[in-house]
Image (cartoon, rainbow, N blue to C red):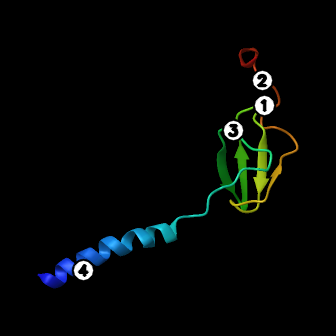
Amino acid sequence: MRKLRYAAMIAVIVAPAQAAAAAPPPVFAPANGIADPGVVRTGGDFYAFSTGTRAPGSRGDEAAGPWRDLRDPALSSTGPWAG
């Protein structure tokens, strides 16, 4: 019974350290910032789109960057309600 208690105590102490080590690196925004990003991966590239005029976007080879602005925003125009 004593060994079981020690094993449980060690598991409680070690488990958070293992979980923290397994956390993925964060996805960083481009240098100019990005509001409310949505990030998708397609092929080997990451794309981030944000709120703003016509949904500007950025592309990165890795989730951690570097990020480059896309030439054109995701939307070609906005509806009259988007004033």
- Tag 2: amino acid: Thr
The residue that disc 4 covers is 7
Tag 1 and tag 2, C-beta contact below 8 Å? yes
- Rate crowding at label 4 as few (under 14), some (14 to 19) or many (20 or more) other CA atoms within 10 Å: few
Q: Earlier in the sequence, mark 3 or mark 2?
A: 3
Closer to us: mark 1 or mark 4?
4
- Tag 4: amino acid: Ala
Farthest residue, direction left: 1
Numbered mark located on residue 4 in the image:
none
Secondary structure under badge 2? Answer: loop
Q: Earlier in the sequence, mark 1 or mark 2?
A: 1
Secondary structure under badge 1? Answer: loop
> How far from the left and from the top, in percent, is residue 34?
72, 42
Query: Which of 80 and 64 lies nearest the eye of the viewer?
Result: 64
What's the distance in space between the residues labelled 1 and 3, CA to CA? Answer: 13 Å
What's the distance in space between the residues labelled 2 and 4, CA to CA? Answer: 60 Å
Secondary structure under badge 4? Answer: helix
The residue that disc 2 covers is 78
The residue that disc 3 covers is 35
The residue that disc 1 covers is 54
